[in-house]
Amino acid sequence: MRTLRPTLRVALTLLASCLGLAAAPASAETIVRFSIGTTFFDVALSSDPALATTVNNFMNYVNTGRYTDTLIHRSTTYDPQQIQIIQGGSYVLDGSTINEIATDDPIPLQATFSNTRGTIAMARTTDPNSATSGWFFNVTDNPSLDGNYAVFGAITDPAGLAVMDAIASLQVYDLSEQLGPAFSELPLINGNSLVVFNGIAPVPEPSTLVLAGVGLAAAAFTAARRPRRVAC
């Protein structure tokens, strides 16, 4: 079982040549931004080919806008005996009504990485090959889930982890009688507000022009730091 731990993403790899040009990274992760009002955090999705079906499935929901106004409908962090996760991606807030997301066909299980703190994984039923739109964040390391749930990305920085922890710290309410069995562990802000992602969208990669500009700036900085040679 490989471990995918959240790390600070290096946005650009600068390989300055003698001409001062920068080479773009050979490959780049897809970065997706989760927005809650004016607060947001970024998640880097794995580029491992073994997770291609899982990542493509998630991005299909992102690109078709089906994750807009989705909510965190489950949090298990109140019980130290349970796995520690916050779960979303299955329900959308439409005005004052909560509806299920329109889902595509289920995907096969691709359980390659470990469920370490800050990673995102696909939710599913008891059938290993039943994941559709639902996902969850591992608030702590959850090794008991390894091999059974498909981890496919990770929160990119400590500020993002702090947002995850803030959601995980919310009080949980059992609203299963009012909303259905999926809402027996519903986190609420101040006891009356849902945690809603008003947007989940890809973060654009820098353009070639920007990359070249950064490369030239890096080359100039490098040149400025070099000791001057005195001609003989």
Image (spheres, rainbow, N blue to C red):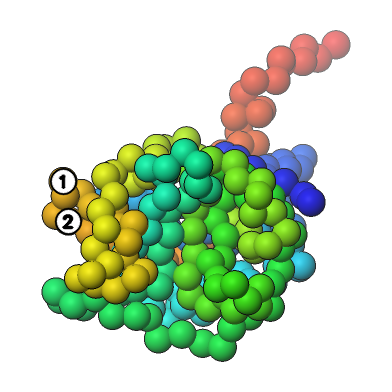
Q: Residue furthest right?
A: 232
Q: Residue at x 49, y 59 (%)?
A: 136
Instruction: Left or right? Give the position of 180 relative to 201.
Output: left
Is the residue marked by circle 1 packed among few (<14), some (14-19), or many (20+) residues within 10 Å?
Answer: few
- Identity of the amino acid at label 2? Ser
Position of residue 179 relative to residue 220, above or below, is below
**Foreground of the two, 14 or 136:** 136
How far across and down, in percent of the image, does residue 190 sit?
A: 16, 46
Query: Residue 163: image x %, image y %?
Result: 37, 43
The residue lying at 66 percent from left, 73 percent from top is 128
Quadrant containing the C terminus is top right
User: What residue sits 49% from the left and 64% below the top?
Assistant: 135
Which residue was labeled with disc 1?
A: 190
What SS does tag 1 mark?
loop
The answer to which of 54 and 78 lies nearer the viewer is 78
The numbered dot on residue 28 is none
Check if mark 1's residue and mark 2's residue have beta carbons within 8 Å: yes
Q: Is residue 59 above or below residue 113?
A: below
Is residue 194 among the parts visible in the rendering? yes
The local secondary structure at tag 2 comes to strand
Q: Is residue 97 above or below residue 75?
A: below
- x, y (%) of residue 143? 66, 46
Q: Which disc number belongs to residue 193?
A: 2
Q: Position of residue 159 (x, y in %)?
A: 41, 37
Amino acid type, callout 1: Asn
Q: Quadrant of residue 107?
A: bottom right
Instruction: Mark yes or no: residue 166 visible.
Output: no
Q: Quadrant of residue 168?
A: top left
Classed neighbour count for the residue bearing mark 2: other residues with Cα under 10 Å, few (<14), some (14–19), many (≥20): few
The residues bearing labels 1 and 2 have C-alpha atoms spaced at a distance of 7 Å
Q: Which residue is depicted at the point 42% across and 50% down?
A: 76
